[in-house]
Amino acid sequence: MGHGKRQGNHRLRGTARHSVFAIHALYFTMQLLDLTLDDPVANIALEEALLDEAESNDEPTELLRLWHLDMPMVVIGRSSSYDSEVNGNQTNIDAVPVVRRCSGGAAIVCGTGCLMYSVILSYQNHPELQQISNAHDFVLTTVSKAINKLGVESTRQGTSDLTVGTRKISGNSLRCKRNHILYHGTLLCNYDLDLVSQYLGTAPRQPEYRQQRNHNQFVANLGVDMEALRQSLIDTWGATQARSEIPSAMVELLLENKYRCDKWNLHGRNL
């Protein structure tokens, strides 16, 4: 996927990145998948496929994935209302893909300057994460540490936001299975913030700290180098085991039966 990246004839081809990692004092080996697929929508299918793959493994799986699009894409939550959260007229005019993810939360728009991350964590390794509030605490504390190492003081506000001051710089959501949890989110580094109001409506559920502010007043960029943030996340999570292979068959099946289907992506839309 991605304009400006190596293009492939196959939609599941992508660009894998390899970094020099520092070993962090986490107790379990964490895999690193630094991979952006050429097909924007396939990146969302891959998130669910990685969770399903972890569930099918005999051993507990811990994984950090990092990816970054060079074009805008709107990603709406599992139960999001398309009509209220997406400016469908504008996304259609600009040919911006809109896809529904497997996790909850409100709509987001990603693209150039927005680093996407996801972690898959095992309940066997972290039984406390079966309580959702603990999952939010654990993941957001770790991500915040990675940001703070770059000299930017970030804090958690609302259910699953990270902020600098009172401005949101990261939105996050999760999906739970029997043995693993997928936790993923956005990190606004140097994003064109005008695209947020251009493609998104007003979220129906707003955290108290937002205080009815519009998108332009509410969101902000970290203003950090994306490569530095990427490396800080790798170091902080202790993702020392690089991988490049993906469960391609699972991704293809999810694309065919879900992520390429209007029934999934547009349900709740007034056509």
Image (cartoon, helix red, strand yellow):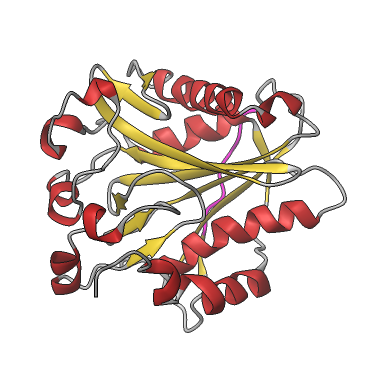
Q: Quadrant of the N terminus?
A: bottom left
Residue 89 found in image quarter: bottom left
Residue found at x 53% / y 44%: 118
- Given the current orientation, which residue lies at the most extreme bottom position? 9
Q: Is residue 247 above or below residue 129?
A: below
> Residue 233: horizontal and vertical position, in percent?
51, 32
Q: Quadrant of the C terminus?
A: bottom left
Q: Is residue 201 above or below residue 24?
A: below
Q: Is residue 167 above or below residue 80?
A: above
Main secondary structure type of the part rendered in magenta: loop
| Near-viewer residue (268 or 21) | 268
| Near-viewer residue (8 or 18) | 8
> Residue 28: horizontal and vertical position, in percent?
76, 31
Task: From the viewer's perspective, tell me whether residue 252 is left or right of residue 58.
Answer: left
Task: From the viewer's perspective, tell me whether residue 87 is left or right of residue 57.
Answer: left
Residue 7 found in image quarter: bottom left
Q: Which residues are magenta?
A: 16-22
> Residue 122: horizontal and vertical position, in percent?
73, 38
| Near-viewer residue (192 or 160) | 160
Task: From the viewer's perspective, tell me whether residue 75 is left or right of residue 252.
Answer: left
Residue found at x 39% / y 75%: 262
Residue 2 showing in the rendered view:
yes
| Number of disc labels | 0
Residue 1 showing in the rendered view:
no
Task: From the viewer's perspective, tell me whether residue 175 is left or right of residue 173.
Answer: right
55 drawn magenta: no
Residue found at x 38% / y 64%: 99
> Residue 222: horizontal and vertical position, in percent?
27, 30
